[in-house]
Amino acid sequence: MERKIQNKVELVKIVGISAGGGKRVLLEEAVHLALKEGATDLHYIEGEHPCMRVNGEVLVWYAGRGIREEIEKCMPSGTDPVRESDFTWHSGHHRARIHCYQKQERLALAIRFLPDRIPTPKELHLPPVLYQKVMYQTGLLLVTGPTGSGKTTTLASLIQELNHTEALHILTLEDPIEYFHASKKSLVIQREIGKDTESYVSGMLSALRQGPDVIMVGELRDVESIMAALHLAETGKRVMATFHAGNVEKAIYRIIDSFPADRQKWVRSQLAASLSAVVAQKMAGPIGRRMRPVFEVLLNHRSVAHLIRNGEIHQLPSVMQAHQASGMQTMEMELRKLQEEGIGAIE
């Protein structure tokens, strides 16, 4: 849904420029307005009106257009403007993850604002079973969901909780590093892909020689990274990773289907043995001026492992519904509960 920002004259006055399609909007001005409006995302594109996402809606700021020089100025030195790149941005208490890309020979930035501190599991409304049980178990915890659903923040919150409660060696592999963890009760080592290690796979292979208790993997992108994560989980490590899929069932199907047919029986067996849990999340709301995540939870136990091993993935939603008392739930179950409490639908 697209609409103009309300009270345009007042907002334009705050940033000190006049409305009009021919005017130019500095990146700093667009960021200032986006933060003031409580936006989660800002799209700043050369020659186009800035857009921001507030409470799930895309708002267009018609005060002016993006400037190429502003985009080039914020890019890390040595970045090829023609190639896509990801980096983090810091200014005072504000932090953001930035994706730089090119569209029709124009430079563009997709900016996602990050919280100024790592939220606690309770602040994120994480299912209690995650921070009371699952994160203390060995095996692979898979957090899945669409882009922008808060997967990285969920993992950062769990890592922070472990850092404050257990004496562990925690290793994170990230692209880029979005949240910084100062070692507290645990030793936390954060490595950035492309700077500290070549790839997620090389970082996971190296982890075997570094002796961590917990490995957080920013994203499982391909067969090789999935295999490496499963191997780490098989060796008794706690592995946490994100994956792109709409729900628990689709996540497991996607992992299995990413392998050749003659390897799918093997990967089903590995998942059955190594998974600790699969969590899917999406954004719902708004509540006031904010969206909030909603969750689907699958915990691995004997009946779940049996279904995965035998390829009966379609039966997993029924298991989640039947084992609510153990902490499992489908997305529909939580949405029904939230709607009863007056909280909105999925973004």
Image: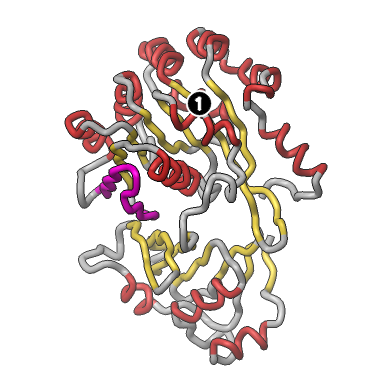
Left or right: residue 309 versus residue 200 is: right
What is the three-letter code of the residue carrying label 1? Answer: Ala
Residue that carries the numbered disc 1 in the rendered image = 277
Image coords of residue 42 (percent x, y) = 52, 66
Q: How busy is the neighbourhood of tag 1: few (under 14 within 10 Å), some, or many (20 plus)?
A: many
**Quadrant of the rendered image containing residue 206:** top left
Element type at mark 1: strand
- Residue at horizontal 71 percent and vertical 56 percent from the top: 287
- Judging depth in this view, the residue of 308 and 212 nearest the camera is 212
Seen in the picture, residue 157 relative to 178 is either above or below; the reply is above
Main secondary-structure element of the magenta-colored stretch: loop
Colouring style = secondary structure
- Judging depth in this view, the residue of 163 and 34 nearest the camera is 163
**Quadrant of the rendered image containing residue 241:** top left
Is 185 within the magenta? yes
Image coords of residue 285 (percent x, y) = 70, 52
Seen in the picture, residue 156 relative to 1 is either above or below; the reply is above
Is 93 within the magenta? no
- Residue at horizontal 21 percent and vertical 29 percent from the top: 208
Image coords of residue 19 (percent x, y) = 60, 88
- Residue at horizontal 19 percent and vertical 34 percent from the top: 210
Seen in the picture, residue 112 relative to 123 is either above or below; the reply is below
Quarter of the rendering occupied by the N terminus: bottom right
Image coords of residue 114 (percent x, y) = 47, 60
- Residue at horizontal 33 percent and vertical 57 percent from the top: 85
Seen in the picture, residue 285 relative to 111 is either above or below; the reply is above
Left or right: residue 283 versus residue 151 is: right
The answer to whether residue 335 is seen in the rendering is yes
Q: Which residues are magenta?
A: 177-193
- Residue reaching furthest to the left: 209
Left or right: residue 327 versus residue 206 is: right
How many marks are shown on the rendered structure?
Answer: 1
